[in-house]
Amino acid sequence: MSLSEKAQRSARLLALGTFALLAGCQVKPLYSDGAQGKAGTALASIEISEAGDRVEQLVRNDLIFLTSGGAGEPASAQYKLALTVTSDVKGVLYDQESDTAGAGRVVVMADYNLTRSDTGETVRSGNRSAVALVDFPEQEFAKVRATRDAEKRAAKELAEIIRADLAAAVGR
């Protein structure tokens, strides 16, 4: 057997082994057992506490949409999520002469506690935060709108982070 025949045989065996290895691979969502899955069903049965302010309402609305797949709040919840959200606006680029900030960041923070409705047992608790950068224009109305838009972006990101935490907790 010549060297080229050995190389061809080795290449065929390598290709066959690769195909056999890849035949067992699947692509599916991380927290799903099927179309809806265990975690998806559990996420859809989470009742989220009422909001106290606008930013908390933004996070709550996004969480309801993300956990239920757009179906809204559950009629009979298996879990209750106590959610407390705060936000803070900070200027980071100060102009020394005019003593005003030209840019800043909005930090939205949440403390949450997921419990079972029937037993009251804590399934998951934690705190998370999200940051959105913002430019502060000269006009006051534009500054208010820019801050609100940044709060909305940070709230959406925070809801996605919390949803991932909840999916990991109820998927076990």
Image: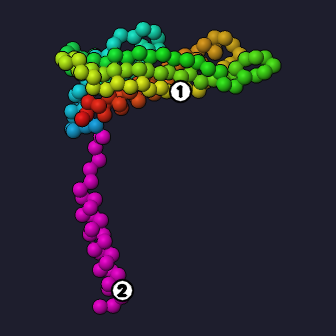
Q: On the picture, is 127 further left or further right than 93?
A: left
Residue 131: numbered disc: 1
Amino acid type, residue under disc 2 in the picture: Ser
Verify whether residue 3 appears in magenta. yes
**What residue is drawn where x is 31% and y is 18%?**
81
**What residue is drawn where x is 32% and y is 85%?**
5
In front of the other: 79 or 40: 79
Measuring from the top left, give residue 43's x and y in whole percent.
27, 26
**What residue is drawn where x is 59% and y is 24%?**
105
Measuring from the top left, give residue 62's x and y in whole percent.
39, 21
Disc 1 or disc 2, which is closer to the eye?
1
Amino acid type, residue under disc 1 in the picture: Val
Disc 2 residue crowd, few under 14, some 14–19, many 20+, Cα 10 Å: few
Q: On the picture, is 9 further left or further right than 161?
A: left
In front of the other: 48 or 35: 48
For the residues labelled 1 and 2, say whether their Cβ atoms are less than 8 Å apart.
no
Tell me the element at label 2. Answer: helix
The image quarter containing residue 145 is top right
**What residue is drawn where x is 55% and y is 17%?**
88
Measuring from the top left, give residue 171's x and y in whole percent.
25, 34
Q: Is residue 78 above or below residue 170?
A: above
The image quarter containing residue 49 is top left
Q: Which residue is mark 2?
A: 4
Residue 58 visible in the picture: no
* First-in-chain label (1 vs 2): 2
> In which quadrant of the rendered image does the C terminus lie?
top left
Tell me the element at label 1. Answer: strand
Start-end of magenta stretch: 1-30
